[in-house]
Image: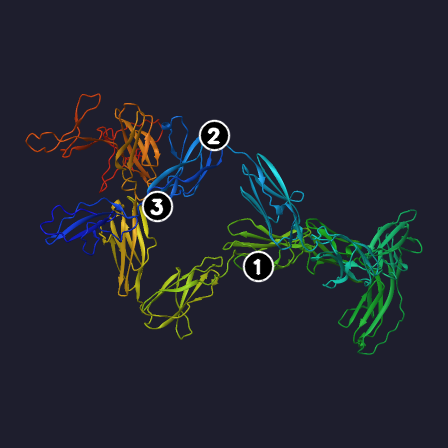
Amino acid sequence: MWQAPKCDGGTPIFSYHIERKDKIGLRWVKCNKRKVKDLQFRATGLLVGHEYKFRISAENAAGLSAPSVSSPFYKATDELFKPGPPCNPRVLDTTKSSITVAWNRPTYDGGSEVTGYLVETCVPSLKAEEEEWTIVSPKEGLRATSFTILNLKENQEYKINISAINSEGIGYPGYVPDNAKAEDRLIPPEMDLDAELRKMISLRACCSLRLFVPIRGRPTPQARWTKDNGEPVERATIDSTSSYTLLVIENVNRFDSGKYNLTIENSSGSKTATVQVKVLDTPSAPQNLKISSVTNEAVILTWDPPVNNGGVNVKNYIVEKRESTRKAYATVNANCHQTTFKVDQLLEGCNYYFRVLAENEYGIGLPIETGESVKVSQKPQPPGTITLKDVTKNSVTLSWEKPEHDGGSRVGCYIVEVLHKGAEKWAQAVIVKETEATITGLNAGEEYMFRVAARNEKGTSDPRQIGVPVIVKDLVVAPVAKMLFNTFSVLAGEDLTVDVPYVARPKAAVSWVKDGQPLKRTTRVNFSSTETLLNLSIKEATKDDVGHYTITLKPDLDIDPELRKIVTINAGTTLRLFIPIRGRPTPAIKWVKDEAPLKETAQLETTSSYTSLVIDKMSRNDSGKYTITAENSSGTMSAGVVVRVLDTPSAPTNLKIKEITNQSVTFEWQPPLLDGGSKIKNYIIEKRESTRKTYAAVVTNCHALSWKIEPLQEGCSYYFRVLAENAHGVGLPTATVDPLKVSEVPQTPKSLMVTDQTKTSISLAWEKPEYDGGSRVLQYLLEVQLKGQEKWNNVNTFKTMEATVSNLNPGEEYLFRVTAINDKGKSEPKVLAGPVMAKDLVFEPDVRPQFSCYSVHVGKDMDINIPIFGRPKPAVTWTKDGAPLKFTTRVNINNTPTHTTLSIKEAATDDGGMYGVTVINPAGQRDTTVEIIVLDKPGAPSGPVRFDEITTQSITISWDPPKHNGGCQVSNYIVQKRDTTTTTWENVNINCARTSIKVPRLKTGAEYQFRIIAQNRYGKSCGLDSSSIVEWHEPVTDGGSPVLGYHLERKERNSILWVKINKTLIHETTFKSYPLEEAFSKTIIINAGETFTLDADVRGKPLPTIKWFKNEKPFENTLRQEIR
């Protein structure tokens, strides 16, 4: 609305032109499109929240008038007010250092959404004007409707008020009733046990158990769940907070039944409650299954009821049996009501397993089984007749018959006992598996009784005793051959076998002679002997076999019976073999080992009566068969002694890698050539990272000849080795020669796609494989195939995940595929979804900024990178506030085929505004806008400083917010005061949230000046100082000439000197008087050794040059001092 011009220029005004200007813009924009004849106009199309000013031009037949003085800035928004006070402010909780308050939203928000809340506190005082309110909430305001005030003084009372904030500012405060004291509240722990939890909770198996119990107390009580007699609840998930505790058990079973105890405890006490839970399930397994009796056809079982009956009584038991050779159980009795049962009609000698299951109304429960098979048998009958087979000076050999009945279980062994004449107690002599035994260690010439008992797995039979005592002594029997015939006949070509029984004690050496010459063994003629029988065998007899054969029984090598067994010796000890010899003439002795000469360290000694072999420091390599040969003119005799050296094994052989994956290595090997004289118990597998020097055991009890080592660290290189272990220790290792990298070929590359194409080239991109096989992908192989052909041609290898294939034929269709390659090989190829034709693309342009609003700190550089699209490449133009963007040394645009970038160096406040981007190509046009906000400290508060109320001790002042808030909300104001008799400014309040304040505790009659500084997150503004507005009236008479202006002077109260205030002529009858002592001067006192900083606000366009001086000398940067 406006008024008509005082002068219409001589012709009627027929239209008005209305223009507006955005506060962040530079141009005036016409508002009306049609003629406006009224003195008011409704401006539309405004942006909400923007500030505009307007001007009017009148038009008559002679033309347009000059525009009117512009109006103030008006914000395009509905009429708004500050919000009302929050509702129901209250104290929720207190501690010795904090108070928690809460409130509800204001009933009236002033027409603008409440954006936050402000919380203030003060210490109560007898005089209200002396109370200082302090903001305790964050500077950016609170979004929640509750807040905890921290760092309070213990037992101190506080006044608290809460104010709401909207776009218009801080609203009226709401006061918390009464004063709140910072003190701890102690509340004993309490729990609200639901009525359902006080009863027995019954639920079916496989359901979920949820026990939710609200709790409270101060301090927050600790919740602890236990079961039955205090055992921890292992399967449960427990969630406890300050207000509740929750126990959850998924898929409950019979074992989850019982009492669940909840104990909550804090410093004020404790409380315990119990919840009884019954899980309805099948029973658990019966207990203590025992075999109380076994016969040759029946077994009696006994057991105890299950510990957990599944919530209901057990109806009956099911008894089952299974033969040890079968896998399935057969039911013996499905309705047993006792805890004992006789299983009869079993097959004698068979092995059986038995099991028992309890049954209730929910089904059959878990079984309990016998740990080992039970053989249906009993102890055997006594052995049969005992026969004396042989007697020597220290041993007796017995034989006996098997028992008539073995009790249904095979006789495992026989126990031979001996009773010395004159003794009363039988002593166990030997346990054997055969029906013959030799009892050694007897005293020559002594008389002994013997008895034998049979034993099976059910027990030992009654013993069978020999008929008469046995005297221990050597039996000497001269060698005698018992020839049944002296002449043997055989047809030519037929085989002849001659067996000649003989007796000799001690054993004699046997030689055969034919026609006075020693008989030689051939492929047809052979002879042999046992302890009781001589044998001559002739195959396919010829006339050459006719003759006189003579048998000579001569002395043998006297090898100790112990040496005829395997001689076992520990590694590192000395082997000593002593063998008596007999023969005439004295035989020649020869020793060999495994048909090879003895090693040089072997020591040999031979006389006419004995030979000895000594080898020191035996090792596993000395194991083998040592053969001694005695030879004289009467014949040759050989005997062997098998020596086993007990040592650790040699190294395993043929270590091979069988498989390598990204997490494991599988390898195999063969047993060691030498087992160290003891069976290999197990193998030890060890690994070592290639960067380390020591091996670490993977497994120490491997019983196979292969092993899979996992998990291994993907991509690492390892050495591996295997060692065999026997009863004597760990043997030598066999190891991999080179390190093995734990990896495999990569997976297929992902998302192969076409990113661009022309008539002669196609650009592709892909993503790396989801998994690289444990080894870094080294390169990618790209291949091309012309449509209709089968052959794939290599394009090239690439280390990046994009490529352009050029030199293509226009109009042809091509198919592409890509393969990932690491040090283990190639992956499967990723093939493009379909063939692509080589042709130029045309599509309309598009511009897509990532954000609609960007911000930058003043003085900082800014780059806005906006993606653009289009084919062919679109042309890009920029505007600012509707006008073409002007490029300067600070503001510049850089365009690429895919992006347009706005660069602003050392951003200034004027750089803020609405920027438009337009992209155009033959296919179309697309526009977008982005807003740039320059973040800076705010401008000075808007003046003048108003004195709303003045008393003898206080002054209430107010001001207006800054016209420029620096791009973010003003968080607080700093209010300072200065007695005009001094130059020192004192802080009144450094955290003032409103644009008014009451300054208390002033001196009556003193004169003060006030300074207001606005602050946001980026810094402090320049100060707005209070000033005196001096007004006067025009002179009564002008002296006959018009008054050109006025001069104004002032003097201090205690001074006699008047000082001129104005620097130029004053044309009005008012003048704003500032203090003269406003130079930047301040004294700072610090202690030696401390660090101090001087801050000075500097602004100007262009940025002014800054120089510092100390004692009128230029100040320069050194190691101790810095200007920045």
Q: Which of the two discs, 3 and 1, labels the residue nearer the N terminus?
A: 3
The residues bearing labels 3 and 1 have C-alpha atoms spaced at a distance of: 75 Å
Residue occupied by mark 2: 154
Is 627 on the left or on the right of 885, as rendered?
Answer: right
Amino acid type at image mark 2: Glu
Marks 2 and 1 close (CB-CB < 8 Å): no
The residues bearing labels 2 and 1 have C-alpha atoms spaced at a distance of: 69 Å
Q: What is the quadrant of the C terminus in the image? A: top left
Residue 766 lies, in percent from the top left, at: 41, 62
Which element is circle 2 on?
loop
Residue occupied by mark 3: 111
The residues bearing labels 2 and 3 have C-alpha atoms spaced at a distance of: 41 Å
Which element is circle 3 on?
loop
* Viewer-side residue, 139 vs 1107: 139
Residue 580 lies, in percent from the top left, at: 79, 54
Which element is circle 1 on?
strand
Determine crowd level at label 2: few under 14, some 14-19, many 20+ residues with C-alpha closer than 10 A: some
Amino acid type at image mark 3: Gly
* Viewer-side residue, 122 vs 668: 122
Amino acid type at image mark 1: Thr
